[in-house]
Amino acid sequence: MASTVIAAAASSSMAASAIRATRCYALPYLPPRSASSSQSFPIKQVSLTASESRRLTPFQTRASSSEESPVDANEIFTDLKEKWDGVENKSTVIIYGGGALVAVWLSSILIGAVNSVPLLPKILELVGLGYTGWFVYRYLLFKSSRKELATDIEALKKKIAGTE
């Protein structure tokens, strides 16, 4: 008797959860497509004034023929082969490239672990927004600070290039 009561209670709770799990969503009614509307579209001609046409000219593009390919795969491979042949210490390049791939792989694992912690991604997002606001206020808001940022960037470029 007790086992039948437990079985009945279990089956009724499973049925109730199945009923709760299924949801019906109503889709909006779309009118049927007519045969004439799917085959031809009306074209509306728009006349532009002179100022509007000047404003839109930077966005105009020209179609090129398929014969003029700006990128040639053979040319790219020959350039890469020439550059690889010009490298003196190939083992160092391979080691640096492999190290870069390992670093990207490890950083993706680290980011995945950080994202799995419940509040940490939102806190880091707030820290990033705060730093972005500080950077804009410190370097981008005023003309004198923009000049200072430009000189700092130029000094860093010279330091990296070794011309300083």
Image (cartoon, rainbow, N blue to C red):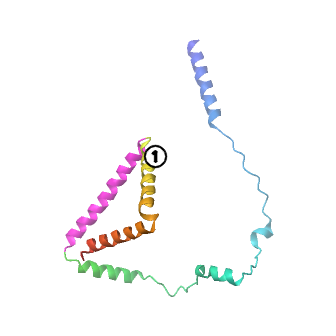
Front residue (pair 83, 111): 111
Query: Is 152 above or below relative to 4?
Result: below
Residue stretch rendered in magenta on the structure? 89-117
* Magenta stretch: includes residue 101: yes
Front residue (pair 139, 121): 139
* Residue 85 percent coordinates (x, y): 24, 80
* Residue 49 percent coordinates (x, y): 72, 82
Task: State which quarter of the image contains the C terminus.
Answer: bottom left
Query: Is 23 above or below relative to 91?
Result: above
**Which residue matches tag 1?**
122
- Which quadrant of the structure image shows residue 15? top right
* Magenta stretch: includes residue 24: no
Q: Which residue is drawn at 41% across and 63% down?
A: 139
Front residue (pair 48, 89): 48
Give left or right: position of 103 versus 60: left
Q: Main secondary structure of the magenta part?
A: helix
Query: Is 89 above or below relative to 113?
Result: below
Q: Which residue is drawn at 79% across and 59% down?
A: 32
* Residue 93 percent coordinates (x, y): 24, 70
Query: Is 121 above or below relative to 157?
Result: above
* Residue 126 percent coordinates (x, y): 45, 49
Q: Residue at x 33, y 73 (%)?
A: 154
- Which quadrant of the structure image shows residue 84? bottom left
Which residue is most to the top? 1
